[in-house]
Amino acid sequence: MSAIEVSGLKKKYGSLQAVDGISFSVKKGEVFSLLGPNGAGKTTTIEILEGLRDKDEGTASVLGLDPWKSGYDLHKQIGVIPQGFKFLDYPTPKEAVNYYATLFGTKVDADQMLKRVILDEAKNIWFQNLSGGQKQKLGMALSLVNDPQVVFLDEPTTGLDPQARRAVWEVIRKLKAEGRTVMLTTHYLEEAEVLADRVAIMNHGKIVAMGTTDEIESKYGSGQRMVVKAKDDLLRYLKENTKLEVDGDGSTVTVFLRDKNDAMVALGAIEESGAGWDDLTVRKDRLEDVFLRLVGETGDEEAGAR
Ligand SMILES: Nc1ncnc2c1ncn2[C@@H]1O[C@H](COP(=O)(O)OP(=O)(O)O)[C@@H](O)[C@H]1O
Ligand SMILES: [Mg+2]
């Protein structure tokens, strides 16, 4: 049985179609990532699944329940960390976990819980003095207090430094190892690539590609590309003297290879051009290349940052 089923889901804010008819399902025990730039509709989608927002059209079910109608039953079985998780300034992580356990009417071993999210070293420090990564890990500990089957993480690593990001990844891997279903939104490609079993790339409310990283790369990738460090004079030479499909950004020139012959033609032309070049590599399209093609440069510095 699927943990999450979504079909034809739509949500409008005024005249803005924030979620525009998306469908996907997430299997039990899977890490599924909604990957997309700011404004793509990720948070809206995840909040509908958490029962925090009503949908306009379509169907959504989590663990067989309608999140909007059966929120009370559902909240006992899911863990939620909202985007930009914050807490009161003065409780320590240990106090916060005990407080949450009381709210849920469950008993937890707070020390053990904080060990699970690799936060035991900071368990007695006030929330306001925790680092960004430690705050996120506390969010995870709190979301686990009710032993949830499904955990929703909305941009859990946005704004964290690379080391803190990796620490959060380690906790997400543990959640998967424990058999939990994880729905993760992120605008970091690398995060989806490293953690997710399957990825849905979302843009302007629509899913533009979905599958495993390998599936997306082979379905939407253009195949092999030759990348060479060279200035635009080489780009111009290749455009004027060959029929190759080329692109450049001032410091690298990319030749999209349709077949093996293209590679031979490209090598010959690069040699004949007399242009300076260095560092020639041939590689397959990666998720990043597909993402940029499908979503485009967003103009937002952070979106798609690695
Ligand atoms: N409560 C709201 N009222 C009006 N517009 C909203 C509201 N929440 C989000 N939006 C808009 O809907 C779009 C999708 O937002 P969101 O779901 O937060 O995307 P993401 O999480 O991918 O950044 C954005 O253009 C955003 O500005
Ligand atoms: Mg968001």
Image: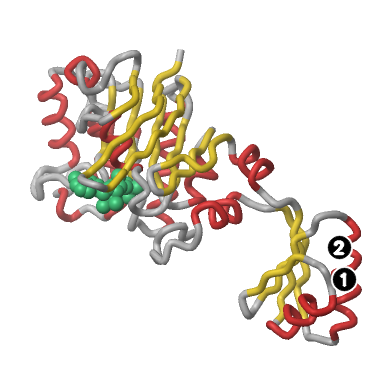
* 196 with respect to 60 (left or right): right
Contact flag, marks 1 and 2 (Cβ < 8 Å):
yes
Residue 266 position by quadrant: bottom right
Estimate the x, y position of residue 123 in percent, counting from the top left: 22, 42
Instruction: Give above or below for 20 relative to 39.
Output: above
Estimate the x, y position of residue 186 in percent, counting from the top left: 40, 47
Q: Which residue is mark 2?
A: 263
For disc 2, the neighbor class at 10 Å (few under 14, some 14 to 19, many from 20) is some
- Cα distance in 3D space between marks 1 and 2: 6 Å
Q: How is the image coloured?
A: secondary structure
* 279 with respect to 54 (left or right): right
Estimate the x, y position of residue 127 in percent, counting from the top left: 16, 48
State the residue in front, 87 or 297.
297
State the residue in front, 213 or 78.
213
Residue name at image x 30 percent, y 28 percent: 57
State the residue in front, 150 or 254.
254
Tell me, yes or no, if residue 134 can be seen here.
Answer: no
Q: Which residue is mark 1?
A: 267
Residue 28 position by quadrant: top left
Residue name at image x 27 percent, y 31 percent: 48
Residue name at image x 79 percent, y 81 percent: 237
Residue name at image x 27 percent, y 47 percent: 16
Tell me, yes or no, if residue 12 can be seen here.
Answer: yes
In the image, the residue with mark 2 has its CB under 8 Å from the nearest atom of ligand 1: no
Name the amino acid, label 1.
Leu
- Which residue extends farthest front? 15
Estimate the x, y position of residue 47 in percent, counting from the top left: 26, 35
Q: Secondary structure at mark 1?
A: helix
Q: Secondary structure at mark 2?
A: helix
For disc 1, the neighbor class at 10 Å (few under 14, some 14 to 19, many from 20) is few
* 60 with respect to 138 (left or right): right
Instruction: Give above or below for 297 relative to 222.
Output: below
